[in-house]
Image (cartoon, rainbow, N blue to C red):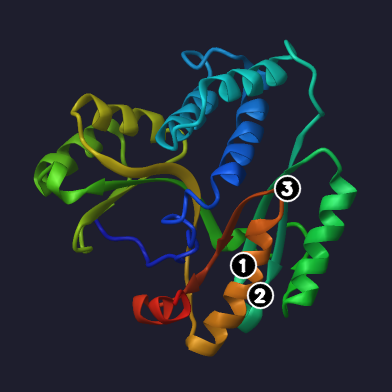
Amino acid sequence: MSGHSKWAKVKRYKGALDQKRGQVFSRLSKEIQLAAKSGGDPDTNLKLRTILLKAKEVSMPADTIKRAIDKGTGAEAGAALEEVTYEGYGPAGVAILVEAVTDNRNRTAADIRSIFSKYNGNMGESGSVSFLFDKKGLIIVRKESIGEDDLMGAVLDAGAEDMKADKADVYEVITTPESFDKVKKALDDKKVATESAEVTMIPKTTVPLDENKASSFLKLYDVLDANDDVQNVYSNSEISDEIMAKLDK
């Protein structure tokens, strides 16, 4: 299986969950509420089941999960939410996709446009950068949990598209969005430890950034990511581990 291109290191807060726990729970609650519109039973609602797995990974309280499901199904009153995606360019021409969930589209659009403008970016029209990304399932597997050949056999049989083994401590398994749940279940059944598993946007090509350009881009990324309505921020930036280490100090 051929390896896929390097993709942006945009999960800057992955190691800072405690500091962002409230925001993480808020975002997951919105995702659960939206998914539950199609039914509150995770056994028959694939999208809801996938999000609940994410909620379990971060120890989201059961009552918070139930309340979000009830709001989505209409069993409990809640604000009407809708999903919106914004596209634009950041410093050095980096393509950026912003996924948001909002109860006020006009407010959120104005906020996101203002952030792009303030931090040396430009918000574009729908379709201006989305063609530069592919929607894929991405599962990160710890190498100590399974051998490469065993993992490849398991994920191929379950319908995975690709697997990358060139990192020191993890494998990257790539799936279509449709086969993601089946591949993840195959790994769960084999008791394979996964570091993360999600349907995400992977850039087709990346833009390497030097330290100055990376610093400018990450200022924009951080403010977008901190917005209350924003769920995910994706980019095609490529920042080396060495530069990221310097900027994270």
What's the residue type where badge 2 is placed? Gly
Hey, which residue is sitting farthest right in the picture?
A: 106
Please name the residue shown 41% across and 56% down the image.
Answer: 15
Q: Quadrant of residue 87?
A: bottom right
Query: Which sits in the foreground, 222 or 82?
Result: 222
Q: Return the disc, 1 or 3, that comes first in the chain's sequence.
A: 1
Q: Viewer-nearest of labels 3 and 2? A: 3
Q: Is residue 16 left or right of residue 155?
A: right
Q: Is residue 206 left or right of residue 110?
A: left
Q: Which residue is mark 3?
A: 229
Q: Is residue 106 left or right of residue 54?
A: right
Q: Which residue is mark 2?
A: 90
> Could you tell me how far apart the alpha carbons at marks 1 and 3 are, in whole angstroms?
14 Å
The x, y position of residue 248, in whole percent, is: 46, 74
Please name the residue shown 62% across and 32% down the image.
Answer: 29
> Could you tell me how far apart the alpha carbons at marks 1 and 2 are, in whole angstroms?
9 Å
What's the residue type where badge 1 is placed? Tyr
Q: Is residue 17 visible?
A: yes
Label 3 SS: loop
Quarter of the figure with the C terminus:
bottom left
Q: Return the disc, 3 or 2, that comes first in the chain's sequence.
A: 2
Q: Are marks 1 and 2 in contact (CB under 8 Å)?
A: yes
Label 1 Cα neighbours within 10 Å, binned few <14 / some 14-19 / many ≥20? many
Label 2 Cα neighbours within 10 Å, binned few <14 / some 14-19 / many ≥20? many
Q: How many marks?
A: 3
Q: Which residue is mark 1?
A: 221
Q: Return the disc, 1 or 2, that comes first in the chain's sequence.
A: 2
Query: Which sits in the foreground, 170 or 96?
Result: 170
Label 3 Cα neighbours within 10 Å, binned few <14 / some 14-19 / many ≥20? many
The mark found on residue 176 in the picture is none
